[in-house]
Image (cartoon, helix red, strand yellow):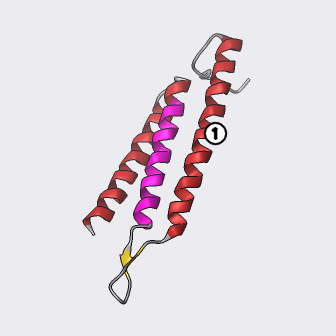
Amino acid sequence: MITIQLYLLGGMGLFTLGLFAALSVAHLLRKILALQVMGSGVFMVLVALGYPRMAGDGTAVADPLPQALVLTGIVVSVSATALALALACRYQAETGRTTLPEDATR
């Protein structure tokens, strides 16, 4: 049971750390990395939810749904990160800045 709790606590810690970083930094690359850390936290929680449990006859049974969700999420995360990095490069090429403007209410 301690392994499940470690994964849950680690996942919640990573998500919280990523959320704090995403809200507190202004640099686009750091925001993208913070979102990746948040995603890793979610994946750890999903892995903990799919941890094998003992069935009635004493055999360990793992739930395949969280495993499939994590694998799909990794593929989507890589694709979304590539898109975000391409948009950040385009934004930097157009404006010459790597941060978003403070006052976006024009």
Q: Viewer-proximal residue, 63 or 103? A: 63
Locate residue 78 relative to residue 23 in the image: left or right.
right
Q: Is residue 100 above or below residue 69?
A: above
Q: Is residue 81 above or below residue 97?
A: below
Which residue lies most toward the left here? 2
Quadrant where the C terminus sits is: top right
- List x then y, in percent, for residue 21: 44, 35
Which residues fall within the magenta stretch? 31-49
Q: Viewer-proximal residue, 42 or 19? A: 42
Q: Is 76 one of the magenta-colored residues?
A: no
As helix, strand or loop, the secondary structure at mark 1 comes to helix
Which secondary structure dominates the residues rendered in magenta? helix
User: For mark 1, does the 10 Å Cα neighbourhood hold few (<14), some (14 to 19), or many (20 or more) residues?
Assistant: few
- List x then y, in percent, for residue 62: 44, 72
Q: Is 46 one of the magenta-colored residues?
A: yes
Which residue lies most toward the bottom here? 57
Q: Residue at x 69, y 19 (%)?
A: 90
Q: Residue at x 32, y 85 (%)?
A: 58
